[in-house]
Amino acid sequence: MFFSVLSTMAIKPSKSMFFFMFLLSSGCFFLGIIEASVHEYKGERFVRKGNAFVVHGGSEGIYSSVSDVSLNDFSASADNGDAYIRFEKIKFRKPELSPNFSSSLIHALVFEVEDRETIGGSAYGGQRAVCCTADLAKLGVCKQGEVIVRPSTRDPSWPQVFSVVFKENRLIATLRSKSIPITKTGMYNLYFIHCDPNLVDLVVAGKTIWKNPTGYLPGRMAPLMNFYGFMSLAFVILGIFWFSQYARFWREVLPLQNCITLVITLGMFEMALWYFEYAEFNETGVRPMGITAWAVTFGTVKRTVARLIILMVSMGYGVVRPTLGGLTSKVIMLGATFFVASEVLELVENVGAVSDLSGKARLFLVLPVAILDAFFVIWIFTSLSATLNKLQARRMMVKLDIYRKFTNALAVAVIVSVGWTCYELYFKSTDVYNERWQNAWIIPAFWQVLSLSLLCVICVLWAPSQNSTRYAYSDDTNEEFDKDETSLTLIKPSPYPSKEFRTAPEPRPVQSNNGTLNDDDLEEDKTE
């Protein structure tokens, strides 16, 4: 254990964001989804940050232990109630051409995010440094070339620092295996740090294990396992309702309803795969890449098909037009582009190493998906407006009522989405150090709930029934009118035109030679 106790008069923590605050925030920024609770280091090089050389070893939210299980009992189950961070086979290797001997210490620094101000310092308000500088060494408060660490006011035993030094003529320094019990819930960070410029090519190998009381699933992700369990149940209930209606009225099923069936099936598979993915992750500490990839793919296909269905319904496909005509290729192209962009983004975020993804790289992947989503929304509402006008002009009141309800549901969904996006941006911008990690799971969960809610609305509006054909496109001219008989009442022609008929300012139906009304004056043009 290594502590350099600094005089509070000599070293004043600055109120502004200095070097180590930037280092911590850059390490925590992309923790929306973490690669694994078993963090492996395969020759990671130390990177110079300020006057220190660092490797970010991991950052995770950990709940405090709920049992007194010994940390030496490695055979204990994943859900035995203990929480810890364990170092296993951590080795530091320097290149053969480096100096044969270095007395500089290499530190493994573990601290809770609330104690970030205890790391580093500055002389009389100057520039903050992680490694002790010559000016600070002259003040006698730290030893030059070592990491500056002050005890926490909450718990003097934290932050925890483990140190190792290279022995003479040795190229490898080994940090012995040890475990740190977690007795306080918080966001914990691990950094490997040294201050010797002669060790610029130093690399670290080994692994650390981060465990929560209920398993190896990171704390901020732990609630998502139960959430996806409930979502799987919700999709099963929706599926029972939909498939029962589908089986009862299978003779009346429309192509649109077949597409909705596909979305429900994909949703059931997606939720089940996510649940099993989190359960496996929680049990082993390593993300099952195969299950994750399948869950991501099913989810991406579901979102793509759902957007295409909404777009085609908005265009009136199967309701006021039998085909999409020349728009088919454009709709398919938009869907394929959205699928590729979303699949790449989801695979990188869920399967790849997120901590290695820079802000610009992530923006490069997120931006195309956001633009395509916006294009979908604009095209959908533009098409809906045209379809509503067409239905109203043709007096197809039954279909018009359904489309109005559908439009209202979409409008509410878009408004809620915009509001939640603003909240998400606010949440992430004001939580730089992930101090609100226990509530972070709500953000991805909300989008799943919103998607399911909109799907339920569509299922209610277009559920299979004995009257399903009344929603379908038909060449029957009688369908073009409202079923209210008052709107279909025709004026019976008299043998001789009356005076009122001749002088009426409004046009009347013209009588044909055989005594019937001319169909051209009654029927609406059905061409698109």
Image (cartoon, grey):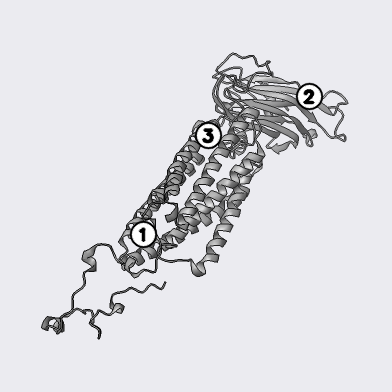
Amino acid tagged 1: Arg
For residue 518, side relative to residue 127 (left or right): left
Q: Is residue 214 above or below residue 272?
A: above
Distance of label 3 from label 1 (alpha carbons): 42 Å
Q: Quadrant of the N terminus?
A: top right
For image coordinates 55% across by 61% down, the residue present is 332
Foreground pick, 128 / 117: 117
Foreground pick, 258 / 395: 258
Distance of label 2 from label 1 (alpha carbons): 76 Å
Comes first in the chain, label 3 or label 1:
3
For residue 506, side relative to residue 425 (left or right): left
Residue 406, percent across and down? Answer: 38, 54
Comes first in the chain, label 2 or label 3:
2
Foreground pick, 39 / 432: 39
Which of pointers 2 and 1 indicates the residue nearer the eye? 1
Residue 470 is marked as: 1
**Which residue position is annotated with label 2?**
174
Label 1: few (<14), some (14–19) or many (≥20) C-alpha neighbours in 10 Å = some
For image coordinates 70% across by 19% down, the residue present is 178
Residue 101, percent across and down? Answer: 85, 27
Residue 323, percent across and down? Answer: 48, 66
Label 3: few (<14), some (14–19) or many (≥20) C-alpha neighbours in 10 Å = many
**Which residue position is annotated with label 3?**
224
Foreground pick, 29 / 495: 495
Circle 2: element type? strand
Residue 415 is marked as: none
